[in-house]
Amino acid sequence: THDQEEALSMSDRVVVMNAGKIEQISTPTEIYNHPKTEFVFQFIGKSNCFEGNVSAVDKRKVAVKIGSDITHVDTNNVMGNESDLKTGDEVKLYIRPEKLQVVSLDEKSSSPLDFHRAKISQMNYLGTSWEINVLLQGKSIQVLTSAIDSSWQNGSEVLIGWSPSEVMLVKK
């Protein structure tokens, strides 16, 4: 089938193909949560993509500069070999909209998430969740969340955050 929801909901194993070549064979949850290639990440489900430059690499994390912000990625989420990454390398970061968290500017706590200042550009109520589009470093990012702050509206400044374990890094 070409229906992703059908394939993920009815299958024990999923095969993702690209131009007749197998990209990944695995369980639906593994395909969605741990794609092995950039193609699989983009093909299955929705994703946001950021571009940046590596600013530091160690055995556990990769620091990436996106505009004027620094964010982090767990090294086990680097597609390819993290030892190939060097300071200054251009990279792409992918993250699912439902893995992002939006909080008011005054709500940032001692959370392990990387938070970045953003501006709400659009809010859509979907019944069971909210789709919020924010501008982060001039890039439109989609967030899916089940709860919002009643004070948020288009133009509100907020913090958008994510866990370094939820971001997938691909060297450009």
Image (cartoon, rainbow, N blue to C red):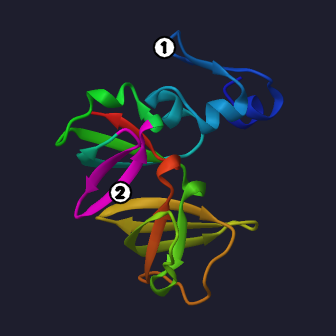
Name the kind of residue labelled 1 in the image: Ala
Looking at the rendered image, the quarter that the C terminus falls into is top left
The quadrant where residue 38 appears: top left
Label 2, on which residue?
A: 71
Structural distance between the alpha carbons of marks 1 and 2: 34 Å
Categorize mark 2 by other alpha carbons within 10 Å: few (<14), some (14-19), many (20+): many
Tell me which segment is drawn in magenta. Answer: 59-75
Q: Nearer the viewer, residue 104 or 6?
A: 104
Residue located at (46% from left, 81% from top):
154
Categorize mark 1 by other alpha carbons within 10 Å: few (<14), some (14-19), many (20+): few
Residue located at (43% from left, 73% from top):
121
- Image location (x, y in percent) of residue 47: 50, 46
Q: Nearer the viewer, residue 125 or 139?
A: 139
Q: Earlier in the sequence, mark 1 or mark 2?
A: 1
Looking at the rendered image, the quarter that the N terminus falls into is top right
Q: Left of 145 or right of it: where is 71?
A: left
Q: Left of 135 or right of it: where is 112?
A: right
Label 1, on which residue?
A: 19
Predominant SS of the magenta segment: strand
Name the kind of residue labelled 2 in the image: Thr
- Image location (x, y in percent) of residue 27: 72, 26
Q: Left of 107 or right of it: where is 93?
A: left
> Relative to 130, is 37 above or below?
above
> Relative to 125, is 157 above or below?
below
